[in-house]
Amino acid sequence: MWEILQAVRVRDILDIAIVSFVLYRVLVMFKGTRAVQMLAGLGLLMVASLLSRRVGLYTVNWILENFWAFWVLALLVLFQPELRRALAQVGEGRLLRRVFGGVSAEQVHVVDEVVKGVESLAAKQIGALVVLERGTALSHYAELGVPIDAVVSAELLEAIFLPSSPIHDGAVFVQGDRLTVAGCFLPLSRNLQLARTLGTRHRAALGLAEETDAVVVVVSEETGRISLAVEGRMDGRLDPPTLRRRLEALLAGGAAPRASFFEGVVRRLDLRGKL
């Protein structure tokens, strides 16, 4: 035993640690998806193969052994949707952030749907106010809203904020991976330095961002611009890729990526004028 431990090198420990961490992050990434059920099924087949060999069920063991001879092809067929989605995320540079950056599959889904939803609303110049809960509970602000409790989707966001919808006036709350309530009214910012032309929707977003650690996405009804309010500050004129990057960083528990010099100038101009 001591000889084996002496043969272990530092690079071997590092190699095992890296592989273990990557496997753990991949399992976390697949948590809650159909891939987990498929992996459990494959695990049961492996156990059945070992038991049939030990008990002497030769026919069953022959069938299972022939199945494992084509396990690579079986994995490609079973996990085709997950593999296709993972390859697409590699092309967008998001898969490594999910594996190493701590962003869960549920958070990635929420960010994707929110970005798609607000992008579509902005193109149609339909105002929207989307609140994403983080550490501070928002139950107090959600009491007067209309209960929804649905999976977050771009289509649902568009349906809620259409002017013909009875609950379009107000904010929707995303808590975890669920859209819980709609038609919520938020506290207005009391910052006296804000321009008088700043709309009620943006003042409400800043007000909640000043009182809580929530992330608030705003779509201007007048201009169709997308803004992000967090920690008492507002970034204006965000394009969808920038919005996705900042939301992923914020929901993963980190700080939002710092804006460039040009983005900072635009933000200050927006706060002095109309967003």
Image: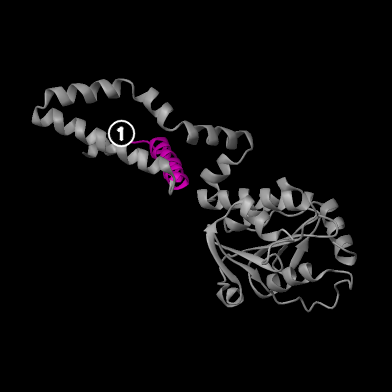
Q: Nearer the viewer, residue 114 or 68?
A: 114
Question: Where in the figure is residue 254, as x and y percent of width and height?
Answer: 61, 57
Quadrant holding the C terminus: bottom right
**Secondary structure beneath label 1:** helix
Question: Where in the figure is residue 40, as x and y percent of width and height?
Answer: 32, 41
Question: Where in the figure is residue 9, as x and y percent of width and height?
Answer: 37, 36
Q: Is residue 109 left or right of residue 269?
A: left
The amino acid on which the numbered mark 1 sits, given as a three-letter code, is: Ala
Residue appearing at x 76%, y 76% in the figure: 189
Q: Is residue 148 left or right of residue 229?
A: left
Report which quarter residue 53 is drawn in: top left
Report which quarter residue 187 is drawn in: bottom right
Q: Is residue 17 magenta?
A: yes
Looking at the picture, does residue 157 appear above or below residue 44?
below
Q: Is residue 89 left or right of residue 241?
A: left
Q: Nearer the viewer, residue 10 or 32?
A: 32
User: Can residue 259 be seen by looking at this rendering?
Assistant: yes
Q: Is residue 107 magenta?
A: no
Quadrant holding the N terminus: top left
Looking at the picture, does residue 193 appear above or below residue 73?
below
Q: Which residue is mark 1?
A: 7
Report which quarter residue 71 is drawn in: top left
Which contiguous range is marked in magenta?
8-30
Q: Nearer the viewer, residue 165 or 194?
A: 165
Colour basis: one colour
